[in-house]
Structure formats: C-alpha cells, structure tokens
Image (tube, rainbow, N blue to C red):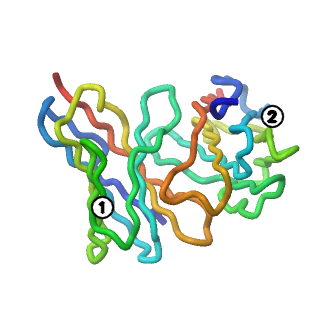
C-alpha cells in the first residue's frame, strides 16, 4: 500500500479483555516497528521485526504483550488481560531495512488509540 | 532511563518569528539524530536529520544544530508559520540498535 495502515484506529476495551492491533506496512518494507505513546510521554519502543523474526523485543513491557509478523507483511500486536496502564496510542512504523534508517526515518501509521476502562 | 530528553513540553511563538526546540541526550554513541513532526490523530512524519559528524543541517525553513560536547541538539524554524503548530519529537539512532529512541516531545503553537 501507499502508506502504513493500522487498524482499528480506536479501540475501547474492558479491563481484563484481550485486544489485537493490526499493522500493514508499506509493501516491500522488511523492517517493522511497534511503539506506543502514553499520555504525556514520549514514543516508547516495543518491538522490532526484520522480516518475520523479531531480533529486538526488549521494549515489550510484560509477558501480556506479544507480537507476530507473517509473510514479511502484516503484524499483529496482542495484549492479553488488558490493564488501565495499557491505555496509549500504539504506533507502527516500517522501513526498507535495518541498514537504511539514517538519514531518513521510519514511515509511521496513524496509530491505534487504545482505551482500557 | 531517559536517553533522549526534551525538557520543554510546550512552546508558543508568534508567526514570522523563530521557533527553537531543544533536545538533550546522554549516550555519546548515538550517530544520527532526527526530528519528527506530529499532528493530532496522525502518525509522526520525518522532518530533518543530522549525522553526528556534522554540526548543522539545513532544509528550507528548518535547521538542526548539533553540539556534541554538550550532547545537545536544537531545531530552528524560521520564519514560523501557523501550519508548523504540532508536536515535535527528537530521536536518536545508534548503529547496531536498528531503532530510534525518542524524546517526550514539545508542543509548538505558532500564533497568527
């Protein structure tokens, strides 16, 4: 596609429920990243995919968070047993590959705003 | 441990004047720095970058300055326009990490 697409754009869920967030990167982009932005905070790195493997999962905050990527394309971020502190905007970004980042940045999607009530 | 810091959460500037957004970092191994701009309900978009071997990079109205000894960079927007009103994030990149580390953002408001 022309850009990075994320769905849903907004999600309200009850505490304790599981949610799945989806990211469609730009076609041909082998690197995919998930970040989140909680209210009043910066962009917090969650996980990085190169192809279908995740060499860096260091930002996943707990074992309730998991992500997968299939076919070097779509990625889903799953949050199990959601908590109120999971409320944030979850942003997905993609790039051509891990070596091409500087001097250019990622291309971000518009994000999924998750609200846990 | 905040490796990239933007200490001013907000800034207001009159249209036509200069906007200066600041960013500090702690890791001397970062070798690229970027600025992103974010409008509400949109993802951040890349604005300008600078390599750690340079001290200035200019692109139209936007100039980024890097002071490595002070571990400080700044983004200058001249002249500021109302359409520049957005949240600006600085980000740092270190070779081998394959990811950017972002600051907390500064909300710029340009007053007409």
Front-most of residues A91 and A109: A109
**Callout 2: chain:** A
Mark in front: 2 vs 1: 1
Estimate the x, y position of residue A77 in percent, counting from the top left.
76, 41
- Residue at (30, 61) in percent of width and height: B73
Q: Quadrant of the N terminus of chain A?
A: top right
A82 left or right of A117 in image: right
Rendered image: mark on residue B73? 1
Q: In the image, residue A106 lies at what x, y percent?
A: 56, 47
The number of numbered discs placed on residues in the rendered structure image is 2
Q: Circles 2 and 1: CB distance less than 8 Å?
A: no
Q: Secondary structure at mark 1?
A: strand
Query: Relative to B60, is B54 above or below?
Result: below
Q: Which chain is disc 1 placed on?
A: B
Q: Which residue is mark 2?
A: A18
Q: Quadrant of the C terminus of chain A?
A: top right
Instruction: Please tell me how crowded label 2 is: few (under 14), some (14-19), or many (20+) other residues with Cα within 10 Å.
Output: some
Residue at point 13%, 32% (across, down): B16
Task: From the viewer's perspective, tell me whether residue A54 is left or right of residue A85.
Answer: right
**Which image quarter: residue B28?**
bottom left
């Amino acid at each position: 596609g022309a850009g990075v697409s994320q769905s849903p754009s907004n999600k309200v869920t009850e505490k304790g429920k599981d949610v799945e967030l989806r990211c469609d990167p730009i076609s041909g982009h082998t690197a995919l990243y998930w970040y989140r932005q909680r209210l009043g905070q910066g962009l917090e790195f969650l996980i990085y995919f190169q192809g279908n493997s995740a060499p860096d999962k260091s930002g996943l905050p707990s074992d309730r968070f998991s992500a997968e990527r299939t076919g070097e394309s779509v990625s889903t971020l799953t949050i199990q047993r959601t908590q109120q502190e999971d409320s944030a905007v979850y942003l997905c970004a993609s790039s051509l590959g891990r070596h091409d980042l500087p001097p250019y940045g990622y291309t971000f999607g518009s994000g999924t705003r998750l609200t846990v009530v | 441990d905040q490796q990239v810091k933007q200490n001013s959460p907000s800034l207001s500037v009159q249209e036509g004047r200069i906007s200066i957004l600041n960013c500090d970092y702690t890791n001397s191994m970062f070798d690229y720095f970027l600025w992103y701009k974010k409008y509400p309900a949109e993802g951040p978009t890349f604005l300008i970058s600078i390599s750690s071997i340079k001290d200035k990079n200019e692109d139209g109205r936007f100039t980024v300055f890097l002071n490595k000894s002070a571990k400080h960079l700044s983004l200058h927007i001249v002249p500021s326009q109302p359409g520049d009103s957005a949240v600006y994030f600085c980000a740092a990149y270190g070779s081998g990490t394959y990811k950017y580390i972002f600051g907390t953002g500064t909300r710029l408001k340009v007053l007409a």
